[in-house]
Image (tube, coloured by chain):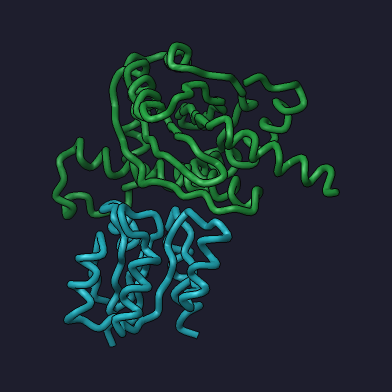
Amino acid sequence: MSTNILVIDDNLTSRAKLRACLPTDMDYAFFEADDLGSALAVTENNQFDICFVDYNMPNTTGLEIAKILIDNGFQCKFILMTANTQQAVLNEAKQLGITDQLDKPVTPERVIEVLKGISK
Amino acid sequence: MKLSQQQNDMLVEVCNIGMSKAAKQLSTLLTDSVEISIPKITISNTESASNYADLFHENSVGCINLSFTGEMAGIALLLFQQSNINFLTQQFSQNIAIQELNLADNELTKVTMEEIGNIIMSSCFTAFANFMDTHIKISVPAYMQGDPTMIINECYQNYTANGDDTDVIALTMNLKTKQHHVSGEFVILLTKESVQNILSTIMKRIQPN
């Protein structure tokens, strides 16, 4: 069964990097959003299994976007994908129920590790 | 503002904590060992800011800059020799299907360097924030390239444009990779208030009561 993956990150190469690091034997559909507006639009008509969300984004942080999506009833497994792992950021994520983390720079090995962790 | 030798040493230690994280990230990105210089602490103003340009052997550099606010406030600049930029971009995007991104070369360089700067500088500020037990708000990075004197002056003047006080504390460190000879300068310009906050955090740890 195909896995629907959404990445919310303002940086194009960061989104492409994640896609390039996904396991080659994984059956998935990959969707992208670069801000709050596009995240709201793509989640309106699609269901997702996994959502990778960046933190440092212009205007609205990735976790603020995640909160808005969750408040709108959007359900999926969120993974915080950032190099900004300040304790305050991790605490904010935890408050939203986001405990999985993928540190940047993203590597194929780490992506596989995180995906295995959430499938348990 | 004048720093005593002890205050200077304290700042060097804190600077080492953050800059070491930055070096580790550069090392991971390039799969290469990174050597870091001892951090330099200087009092800087508009006139002296351009002196940083002397650190570069080329008359064109690529610079990723961002601002940060909170108990630690200021701007950070990560500058690489222009000749290193193509290598950095290629290394970062080596497993990416670049043609699918549909970007002109200069646009690809810009977004890639912004992401590289984001990764390196965010890690540095994470170390600073966790050390100070606080949250440092970081802006989205911006990339520019050109003459180092002009770039540094522009960043500096944008930063001090709204303030009465143009004196800042500059923390500077060189990052150099062993195999690929990539050389970068990481410059953090801090407000005096930030420096006081850092020193006060350290003093509390040394003398808790």
Image location (x, y in percent) of residue B155:
36, 27
Residue B2 at least partly seen: yes
Chain that is coloured green in the picture? B
Residue B194 appears left or right of B66:
right
Q: Residue at x 46, y 50 (%)?
A: B137
**Vertically, is A78 above or below A104?**
below
Image location (x, y in percent) of residue B47:
44, 11
**Vertically, is B185 above or below B203?**
above
Q: Residue at x 49, y 72 (%)?
A: A100
Who is closer to the viewer here, B166 or A4? B166
Looking at the rendered image, the quarter that the N terminus of chain B falls into is: top right
Image location (x, y in percent) of residue B108:
23, 42
Q: Residue furthest front?
A: B164
Quarter-of-image position of residue B59: top left
Residue B178 at least partly seen: no
Q: Residue at x 14, y 50 (%)?
A: B102
Please tell me the colour of chain A: cyan
**Vertically, is A40 above or below B193?**
below
Residue B147 appears left or right of A92:
left
Who is closer to the viewer here, A104 or A56? A56
Q: Residue at x 60, y 40 (%)?
A: B20
